[in-house]
Amino acid sequence: MASVNSATDSSRYGINSDEQIKSAVNVSDATQMENNFISLMVAQIQNQDPTKPVDSTEFLNQFAAMSQVKSLENMTNLSKSNLVLLDNLQTLSAAGLVGQDVKVTTDKVELGADSVKGQINLEFASGKTTLRLTDVNGVKTDIALGSQVAGAVPFELDAAKLGLEPGSYSIEAITDSGEYPKLEVAGRVSNVRVSSDGPVLDVAGVGSVPFYTITEFGQNALAGLL
């Protein structure tokens, strides 16, 4: 069952209320500071020595400097609030992927009863292409994919047909061109968790992956791999 089931449940995603955004730029505090400064300036002018009047330019410079510092502080707070909003939007987007098929870049796969589909993204043609699986004990299994042109090279992993035990395997592609191509694995999102580093998705055939590893999502994400 998904940890995040509804995009409208703002409390579950840590969505902040409008008060948090408004507090980033507290206009009342800035206004109060300016009023206090003006009151002190007026009091000093009224009680100054007539024979040695205070230079008004100094007051204006101090007031301008104070306003600038306050503006910078408000801009910093506003930037922090924008980051909070972006994080919340990312979480909502991740939550909407539950039950959908996605592709993620990965160097690991979870083999079980169902086959795992994916693709190797080659930038250069390869005369000899090999997909290598390594289990937790370090035992390697090579799958020859033959000669391949540049582009997406689809593959399918079936533990039973390969004679492999179900479990976690690291995966890599080896080519004779010296390239270390990226691999994408397709699977369905079953769960989304919110962590300090952002949303984490549980993808069938892959396991837990960060949100930023997603390369494609949507109902037709697997179409190119079937």
Image (cartoon, rainbow, N blue to C red):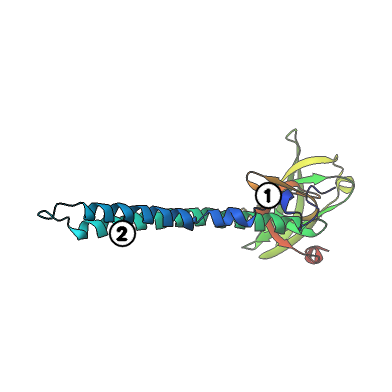
Is 2 above or below relative to 57?
A: above
Where residue 147 appears, as percent x and y from the top left, is: 71, 61
Crowd rating for badge 1 (residues with CA inside 10 Å; few <14, some 14–19, many 20+) = few
Q: Nearer the viewer, residue 215 or 156?
A: 215
C-alpha gap between disc 2 and disc 1: 38 Å
Label 1 is placed on what type of residue?
A: Gly
Q: Nearer the viewer, residue 193 or 127?
A: 193
Residue at 71% x, 62% y is: 216
Residue at 63% x, 43% y is: 196
In the displayed orientation, state which residue is furthest to the top: 137
- Quarter residue 217 falls in: bottom right
Q: Nearer the viewer, residue 139 or 169?
A: 169
Q: Nearer the viewer, mark 2 or mark 1?
A: 2
Q: Which residue was labeled with disc 1?
A: 14
Where residue 197 appears, as percent x and y from the top left, is: 63, 45
Q: Which residue was labeled with disc 2?
A: 64
Does residue 209 appear anywhere in the picture?
A: yes
Tell which circle, 2 or 1, labels the residue nearer the N-terminal end. 1
Where residue 40 appears, as percent x and y from the top left, is: 30, 51
Q: What kind of element bears circle 2? A: helix
Q: Answer with left or right where residue 59 lies relative to residue 120.
A: left
Quadrant in the picture for the C terminus:
bottom right
Label 2 is placed on what type of residue?
A: Ala
Where residue 185 appears, as percent x and y from the top left, is: 75, 54
Does residue 177 appear anywhere in the picture?
A: no
Q: Nearer the viewer, residue 143 or 226?
A: 226
